[in-house]
């Protein structure tokens, strides 16, 4: 490779950089998924239906796919640090503009742009972490990084439950946008990582990637994992309000509290990955969370609440293992490419199309039926892990 790569460090030596990258990863999620606990308020104010509410996340996932697929052009021109800066600053500006929106269409447009910004974040974030940390510590480093999404899912509902009685949903968006802008400026001014370029997508590399069986299998597995995690989360507050009779405040509190365990279970997922291997953790997490998802779609009362708490704690173990496996399907020069193609397409399916389907099923049948079907697919899809080919001889660095 003709680019200057950083020297990989042990986990303990790179922990400061890993934590800051995790914070940036967290911001790329909360700026979009804060809309989930705000949906009942937005729906009431703007007069939108359940199906229209679900479509908001479909538009966001389309943006993620577009941003990630073209992220190689940005990171190859501005380095991975520049791509991360553009992502964070761009999201802050768009979210600030979103508070003045008064229609569903403007929110959908904002979600597309927020998705593009997030799509730039993930490939560069992943490329930097796997470049600055030694191979044997990937599980630990990725476990820390993967606390970003669950932390956003914890704080989002709790912030909504705490603040909505006092301020409007627009004020909450404004505060988050300020944090994004300040963080983007801090990254560009003080960041000491990511000063190496990504690889510009080429026909040869893309054709090589699309010809790999593992690429398609990992895409399906990621779609199932994202559906059981973020896809379900986006519609859960609305599901609790519409079909289980919760008030908005208690619904957001339940969702937020249920996500707290995911912050710690992410570390468990990283430890289990280093101990038992990527494939075993991927399969076990999908099967167990699939069973719990079925219970969420069919039960009521206390056992429903138990399933709501247990399902996110299990499914979050999928991601450290899945990202470690994804990084082992290709050599380092193709890591950002495989990440920028696999995860956004999977996110469009699991985090965008699935919530939209749940919204339409909520109008035609019930959201619970859609949740049950997703659980069945997670159990059956876990068997695909046997068709993933992992490389044993890997180069270090970027």
Image (cartoon, rainbow, N blue to C red):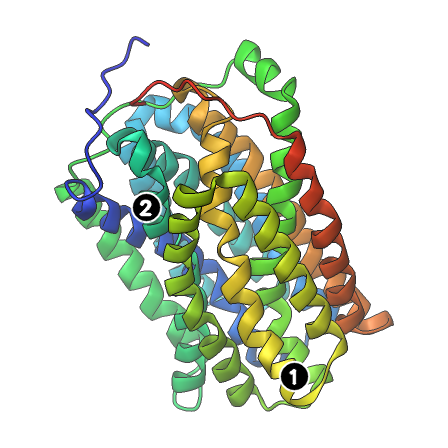
| Residue that badge 2 annotates | 140
Tell me whether the residue at label 1 lies in contact with that at label 2, contact meaning CB atoms closer than 8 angstroms. Answer: no
Q: Secondary structure at mark 1?
A: helix
- Which residue, as the protein is rendered here, is positioned at the far right? 364
Q: Position of residue 88 (x, y in %)?
A: 33, 48
Viewer-side residue, 333 vs 161: 333
Viewer-side residue, 295 vs 227: 295
Q: Position of residue 334 (x, y in %)?
A: 45, 21
Left or right of residue 190, residue 279 in this image = right
Name the quarter where the C terminus is drawn. top left
Q: Secondary structure at mark 2?
A: helix
Left or right of residue 9, residue 384 in this image = right
- Give residue 173's quadrant in the image: bottom left
Name the quarter where the N terminus is drawn. top left
**Above or below 280: residue 299:** below
Asked if residue 321 can be seen in this view, the reply is: yes
**Above or below 301: residue 121:** above
Q: Position of residue 264 (x, y in %)?
A: 37, 64
Q: Position of residue 55 (x, y in %)?
A: 67, 59
Label 2: few (<14), some or many (≥20) within 10 Å?
many
**Residue 35, label in figure:** none
Q: Residue placed at 66% from the left, 81% from the top?
A: 304
- Give residue 8's quadrant in the image: top left
- Which residue, as the protein is rendered here, is positioned at the far front? 276
Asked if residue 59 can be seen in this view, the reply is: no
**Above or below 265: residue 389:** above
| Residue that badge 1 annotates | 303
Viewer-side residue, 397 vs 1: 397
Task: Give me the C-alpha separation between circle 1 and circle 2.
Answer: 33 Å
Q: Residue placed at 42% from the left, 35% from the top?
A: 123
């Amino acid at each position: 490779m003709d680019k200057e790569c950083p020297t990989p460090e042990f986990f303990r030596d790179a922990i400061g950089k890993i934590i800051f990258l995790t914070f940036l990863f967290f911001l790329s999620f909360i700026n979009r998924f804060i809309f989930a606990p705000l949906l009942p308020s937005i729906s009431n104010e703007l007069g939108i239906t359940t199906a229209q509410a679900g479509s908001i996340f479909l538009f966001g996932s389309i943006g993620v796919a577009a941003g990630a697929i073209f992220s190689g052009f940005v990171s190859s021109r501005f380095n991975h640090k520049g791509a991360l800066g553009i992502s964070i600053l761009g999201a802050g500006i768009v979210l600030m503009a979103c508070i003045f929106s008064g229609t569903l269409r403007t929110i959908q447009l904002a979600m597309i742009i927020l998705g593009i910004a997030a799509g730039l974040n993930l490939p560069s974030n992943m490329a930097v972490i796997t470049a600055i940390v030694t191979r044997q510590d990937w599980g630990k480093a990725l476990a820390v990084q993967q606390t970003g999404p669950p932390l956003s899912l914890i704080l989002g509902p709790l912030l909504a439950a705490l603040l909505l009685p006092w301020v409007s949903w627009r004020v909450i968006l404004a505060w988050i946008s300020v944090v994004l802008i300040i963080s983007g400026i801090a990254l560009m001014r003080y960041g000491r990582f990511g000063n190496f370029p990504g690889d510009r997508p080429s026909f040869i590399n893309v054709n090589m990637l699309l010809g790999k069986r593992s690429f398609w299998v990992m895409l399906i597995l990621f779609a199932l994992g994202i559906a059981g995690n973020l896809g379900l989360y986006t519609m859960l507050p609305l599901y609790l309000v519409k079909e289980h009779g919760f008030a908005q405040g208690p619904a957001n509190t339940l969702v937020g509290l249920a996500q707290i365990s995911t912050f710690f279970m992410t570390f468990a997922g990283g430890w289990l990955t280093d101990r038992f291997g990527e494939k075993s953790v991927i399969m076990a997490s999908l099967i167990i969370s699939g069973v719990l998802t079925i219970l969420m779609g069919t039960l009521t009362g206390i056992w429903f609440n138990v399933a709501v708490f247990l399902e996110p704690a299990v499914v979050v173990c999928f991601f450290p293992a899945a990202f470690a496996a994804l990084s082992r399907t290709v050599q380092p020069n193709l890591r950002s490419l495989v990440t920028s193609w696999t995860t956004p397409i999977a996110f469009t399916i699991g985090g965008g199309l699935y919530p939209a389907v749940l919204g339409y099923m909520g109008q035609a049948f019930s959201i619970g039926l859609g949740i049950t079907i997703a659980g069945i697919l997670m159990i059956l899809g876990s068997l695909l892990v046997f068709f993933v080919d992992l490389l044993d001889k890997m180069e270090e660095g970027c």
